[in-house]
Image (spheres, rainbow, N blue to C red):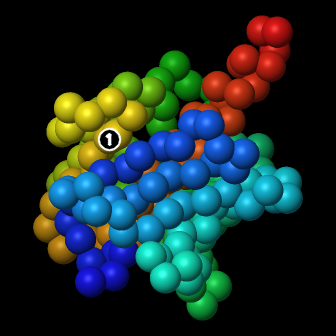
């Protein structure tokens, strides 16, 4: 089976790496692939690799007033755009299709890694949680129904990358 053929994933964030790296595993802990940042990417780009080392998709930050990420498949086709609303009390993320229409909304405690990804009708197509797993430094992604795992993982990775950027900026300004 390929990287995007599962409904449940474990994400392991490697904190002591030069590049931002997320290890993607199945629910048994078997590594399926990685999401790795490009070192020389001004706006931030994460590439998804399968276990054979092939690039199978990417999430790339776009220059914009708000955090915005372009999702592309292995053939570099634009599939969706992930956005965060600026200047709000709580996190407000959504995913737009190619027409600019909202197709997914993120709801919950993003900082605590307890959130749901909802479709247009409000149906929870995925859940992201640290509570699924007792293992420290892991969090789970559970995809409900028949929804594109690549799009769900791309959303989770974009949010994770943006939160890591914010933590890095906050640490740099505190020192």
Q: Residue at x 20, y 32 (%)?
A: 134
Which image quarter: residue 151?
A: bottom left
Residue 125 visible in the current orientation: no
**Tag 1, which secondary structure?**
strand
> How far across and down, in percent of the image, does residue 109 sit?
36, 28
Residue visible at 53% across and 73% down in the picture: 49
Residue 65: x and y in percent read: 76, 44
Q: How many marks?
A: 1
Which residue is under mark 1? Answer: 139
- Residue sitting at x 33%, y 59%: 25
How would you rate the neighbour count of disc 1 (Cα within 10 Å): few for under 14, some for 14-19, many for 20 or more? Answer: many
Residue 105, percent from left and from top: 38, 50
Identify which residue, 13 or 58, lies in the foreground. Answer: 13
Farthest residue toward the bottom?
A: 75
> 51 left or right of 170?
left
On screen, residue 59 versus residue 169, left or right, reads: left
Question: Is the N terminus in the top left, top right, bottom left or bottom right quadrant?
Answer: bottom left
Q: Quadrant of residue 39?
A: bottom right
In percent of width and height, residue 82 lies at 54, 57
Q: Nearer the viewer, residue 49 or 62?
A: 49
- The residue nearer to you, when weighing 13 against 8, is 13
Query: From this viewpoint, is residue 140 visible?
Result: yes
């Amino acid at each position: 089976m390929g990287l995007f053929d599962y409904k449940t994933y474990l994400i392991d964030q490697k904190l002591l790496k030069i590049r931002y790296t997320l290890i993607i595993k199945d629910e048994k802990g078997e590594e399926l692939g990685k999401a790795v940042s490009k070192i020389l990417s001004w706006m931030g780009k994460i590439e998804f690799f399968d276990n054979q080392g092939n690039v199978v998709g990417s999430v790339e930050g776009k220059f914009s007033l708000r955090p915005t990420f372009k999702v592309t498949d292995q053939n570099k086709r634009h599939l969706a755009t992930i956005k965060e609303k600026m200047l709000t009390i709580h996190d407000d993320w959504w995913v737009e299709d190619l027409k600019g229409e909202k197709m997914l909304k993120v709801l919950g405690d993003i900082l605590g890694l307890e959130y749901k990804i909802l479709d247009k009708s409000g149906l929870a197509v995925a859940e992201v949680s640290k509570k699924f797993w007792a293992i420290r430094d892991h969090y789970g992604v559970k995809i409900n129904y028949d929804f594109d795992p690549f799009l769900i993982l791309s959303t989770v990775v974009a949010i994770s990358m943006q939160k890591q950027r914010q933590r890095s900026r906050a640490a740099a300004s505190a020192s």
